[in-house]
Amino acid sequence: MHMPKDPSILFVCSGNICRSPTAEGVFRALAMREAPWLRGTIDSAGMHDFHAGEPPDPRTIAAARRRGYDLSVLRARRIEPDDFDRFDLLLAMDEGHRDGLLALAPPGRAVRVSLYLSHWAEAPRSDVPDPYYGGPADFERVLDLVEGASRALIARLR
C-alpha cells in the first residue's frame, strides 16, 4: 500500500480507555518532537462503545503522565464505518481487534488494517497486552511497547 505524505492513523483497542489512547498520545507527542514534518491526523477508537465519551482509565493517564505524556484531554469513542475512509492506517492493538476491523472493513479497505506492533521489527511480541485487569507494571509495559512501535512507525514513514 502506498502511504501518502501525511498519513492519517487510527489506533484501535477494545474500549478506547487504555491501549489505543496511550498509542494516540505517545505517537502524537513523539511525532511532534521527532518528526515535525509528519502532519497527518492521529486518533484512537474502540471496538465497543462501553466507555464512549469517557477519558482514559486513570491508571493509563497516571502512567503516561510519569513519562511526560498528557492523555487527560482524550475521550473514548467507538470505531465508525467512515473511519475506513478517513484513515490511511487502522492499527489494532491485538489480533482480536485486527480480526474485528477486517470484518468491518468495506471492500478494498482491509489493506489499511494491521497490527500496531507489526510495524516494529524488534517488537518482543505481536500484540499490546490489555493492562486493564493488571497492576502498574502492566501499564508501564504498554508504554514500553507503544514507545518502541511509535518510533519504528515514525522511522518507517520517514
Image: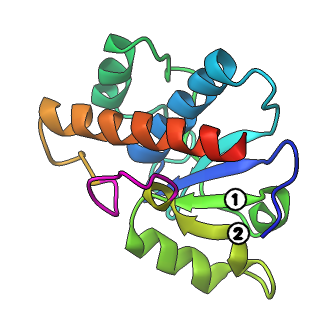
Q: Is residue 120 magenta?
A: yes
**N-terminal of the two: label 1 or label 2?**
1
Magenta extent:
119-128
Residue 108 percent coordinates (x, y)? 81, 84
Query: Which disc is residue 12 wearing?
Result: none
Q: Amino acid at mark 1?
A: Leu
Pointer 1 and pointer 2: residues touching (CB < 8 Å)?
yes
Query: Is 68 displayed left or right of 129 in the figure?
Result: right
Q: Is residue 96 visible in this depiction of the protein? A: yes
Residue drawn at x 18%, y 40% is 138
- Majority secondary structure in the magenta region: loop
**Relative image position of residue 7 (x, y in whole percent):** 80, 48
Asked whether residue 17 is in view, the answer is: no
Q: Amino acid at mark 2?
A: Arg
Vertical relation: 101 (above or below) 127:
below
- Which residue appears at 37% of the width and 22% of the height? 64
**Residue 134 drawn at (x, y percent):** 13, 44
Residue under the point 16% across and 48% down: 133
* Residue with the mark numbered 2: 112
> Can you say which quadrant of the picture contains the C terminus?
top right
Residue bearing mark 1: 89
